[in-house]
Amino acid sequence: MPSDALALAPVILAVVLVVSAVGKLRSPSASAEAFRDLRVPAPLRGRVVVEGLPWGELLLAALLVLVGGPVGIVAAVAALLLFTAYLGLVVRALGFDEDVDCACFGEFAPGRITRRTVVRNAWLVLLAVLAVVVAAQGSSVAARVADDRLPWWWLVGAGVAAATTYLIVGAPSPAAPAAGDVPDDESGDYLRTRTPAVPVSLSDGSTTNLRALSVERPQLLVYVSEMCGSCEEVITSVPEWRTRLPLLDVRLVTRMAAGHTHLTSLEEPLTVHDTEGAFSDTFGLATPSALLLGVDGHLAGGPVTGSLAVPEFVADIEAELAAVTAPEMDPSDAAR
């Protein structure tokens, strides 16, 4: 017979699965991007899998707590396989050339994958192993509570401990505004900040900095990686954006050196190569991201991050330019 503490393992896993599922359901686009960025095999990152995964997690959560016997064992083993797969994905992602954002818990725990992410997922795998041991004993958690073999106050105590831990170390602090994305408290307008003179190199081998780069023409810098699944649509859209935004230079920015990536272009506008990571670190960027540099030496927009946010950003720029350059309507035309 497992101890009360051991029998809490499936309860903890059930809570984790519910949080994970709700987070994914609230932000399905973030989950889809995470599947691409983690390079999940194509057959497993289709719409059916992405949209069905949170419902599967909810079902597993219910089975872990409410069902015993053979079905309970199957559910516990399924949870073990799921969390092991999650662990494998984050361990592999640490070896990627670019940072990867994890949306394992949807909008509730966004952030880049680090060694801490690996430790967290390894701990969940251990809990899943314990859940299998508990399930092998036959009775469900709900049955143990009903029979007083697992006192209800154990569950309340575990919940209080989890809530306290979350409030102390887990609650996300308000995100600091990105450079150039600070609102004016009085007007709510975009508050322009000076473009930092971050050194970068161009695909022709020359070196410059961001402020000098935008002296003659505004620069829309699109930060991508050829290894980033979420960047694929952004990269393929750049030629179209150049047509739509003729007043700007739309440049790809990559961490790879010129000649070491197929994104390198020796035709104007030249690609920007951030080999030292100064550009991405200054703005805290993940791929794909974009920001707009003005010719006055100030940031004109962004940065924004995400495969959905970047095209929206481009559309906003296009609309702003259209409003500025549109000829004033003749009063007689308006009367008609």
Image (cartoon, rainbow, N blue to C red):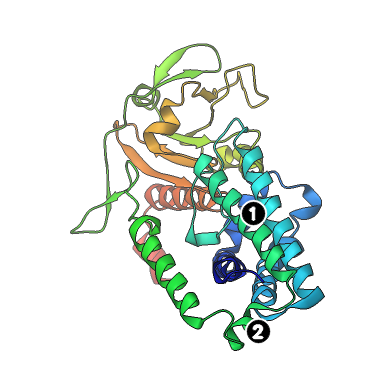
- The residue singled out by tag 1 in the image is 125
* Quadrant of residue 82 within the rendered picture: bottom right
Q: Which residue is situated farthest in the bottom direction here?
A: 146
Counting other residues with Cα less than 10 Å from the Cα at mark 1, is it few (<14), some (14-19), or many (20 or more)?
many
Where residue 170 appears, as percent x and y from the top left, is 40, 57
Gap in angstroms between the C-alphas marked 1 and 2: 24 Å
Q: Is 159 rendered above or below residue 85?
A: below
- Which of 166/319 is in front? 166
Tell me the mark number nearer the camera, choosing from 1 and 2.
2
Rendered image quadrant of residue 39: top right
Residue positioned 22% across, 53% down in the render? 184
Residue 49, horizontal then vertical, whole percent? 74, 62
Q: Earlier in the sequence, mark 1 or mark 2?
A: 1
> Mark 1 touching mark 2, by CB under 8 A?
no
Position of residue 277 in the picture relative to residue 32 (left or right): left
Viewer-proximal residue among 286 and 22:
22
Report if residue 259 is visible in the image: yes
Q: Secondary structure at mark 2?
A: helix
Number of residues whose C-alpha sits closer than 10 Å to that of mark 2, classed few (under 14), some (14–19) or many (20 or more): some
The quarter in which the C terminus is drawn is bottom left
Mark 2, residue position: 143
Residue at horizontal 59 percent and vertical 17 percent from the top: 258
| Res 114 visible | no
Vertical relation: 170 (above or below) 318: below
* Rendered residue at 71%/51% (across/down): 85
Q: Amino acid at mark 2?
A: Ala
